[in-house]
Image (cartoon, rainbow, N blue to C red):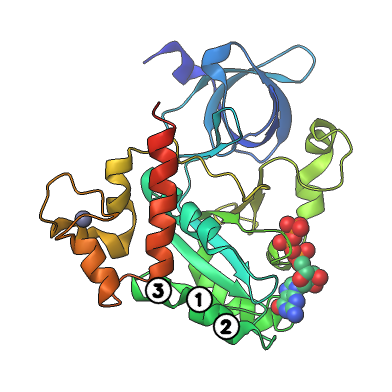
Amino acid sequence: MSRSAELDLGLVVTGHGRHYTVETPEGTRLHCTPRGKKSECVVGDRVRWMPTSTGEGVIEAVEPRRNLMHRQDEWKTKSFAANLDQLLVLVAAEPVFSESQLARALIAAEAAGIPAAIVLNKADLPAIAAARERLAPYAAMGIAVHELALKARPDASRAVLAPLLAAKATLVLGPSGTGKSTLINLLVPDAGAQIGEVSRALNSGRHTTTTTQWYWVDGARSTALIDSPGFQEFGLRQIDAAALPRLMPDFREPSTHCRFYNCTHVQEPGCGVLAAVERGAISASRHRIYCEIREELARSRY
Ligand SMILES: Nc1nc2c(ncn2[C@@H]2O[C@H](COP(=O)(O)OP(=O)(O)OP(=O)(O)O)[C@@H](O)[C@H]2O)c(=O)[nH]1
Ligand SMILES: [Mg+2]
Ligand SMILES: [Zn+2]
């Protein structure tokens, strides 16, 4: 057994810079800092830590991860959550969502090997019909789309979410104004308490969520929601452009029927993907989004 296996185990529930809040198996939360670069971690990480004389902790090692989600800014790709069971993308009837953002989130999840589902909120609004129509290609490719009204029909919404989330760690992502906070507040009544003094101190008094945060839904601490800001910038740069069709379920099969083995599915003759677009099996907007992302990936190679 390695030396680190003898240390206490903990779960990273939030972090800010090199400051983390770690939860012990007994449920106590404490402030930890990593020993060196090797022990830099993200929310969802299981870590080995050692207590200091001042009641804080030093993270000595990060346990192997099952999966890892990335986001990116203009300059670099950064990981932000690990060891997830599923991704829940929250969109709403209003404001109108960006299909490109939705598609990118689903590709990022697929690339990380994390199952994803879509929640369409605000089913009480008339704009729900148009939103449902825009999601039809996603439902058709086998992604579960759950219609909810988190504020207008909270009990019915909770009944839909409970079996979906039970005993899993679910990352909730979505653009601003779709109902992420409404969802957290509905399912985690003591969210404020869970953020706690340690995390509030790390967040340096800001009111909006600026960091990724792990919440327990149940007292037994088996069902978790992970709230994360910043839906815009998804870390797709690590993906190889040629692998993109495999990460888009509606492209997978058609992309195996191209005349050229190195077909890019943009404009080649005899392309299986373009044929699928032609007959409506792939939506025109999905193909447009594919071309857009492909172009970006190709550009970032040089
Ligand atoms: N009509 C309707 N409005 C809702 C529903 N659920 C949430 N809302 C409203 O939508 C608005 C945004 O909800 P939030 O939960 O704050 O959204 P958010 O995703 O946390 O937004 P950000 O914090 O900006 O990212 C609020 O005014 C909610 O009251 C719903 O089921 N129906
Ligand atoms: Mg919010
Ligand atoms: Zn092709």
Ligand 1's image quarter is bottom right
**Residue 297: horizontal and vertical position, in percent?**
41, 39
Quickly name the residue at label 1. 134
Label 2 crowd (10 A; few <14 / some 14-19 / many >=20): few
Does 62 appear above or below 298? above
- Does the closest atom of ligand 1 sit within 8 Å of the Cβ of label 1? no
From where the camera sits, is residue 231 visible?
yes
> Would you place residue 294 above or below residue 124 in this image?
above
**Residue drawn at the location 57% of the way across and 21% of the way down:** 40
Q: Position of residue 225 (x, y in %)?
A: 61, 54
**Quarter of image, res 281:** bottom left
Give the residue number, with chain letter if any, for mark 3: 137
Element under label 1? helix
Which quadrant is the N terminus positioned in?
Answer: top left
Cα separation, mark 2 vs mark 1, equals 6 Å
The CA span between labels 3 and 1 is 7 Å
Classify the position of the C terminus by image quarter.
top left
Are the two marked residues, 2 and 3, in contact with CB atoms closer than 8 angstroms? no
Answer whether residue 185 is visible to the viewer in this image: no
Q: Is residue 194 above or below residue 204?
A: below
Amino acid carrying mark 3 in the image? Pro
Residue at screen point 65% across, 84% down? 127
Residues at discs 2 and 1 in contact (Cβ within 8 Å): yes
- Return the residue at label 2: 130
Pick the front one: 75 or 113? 75
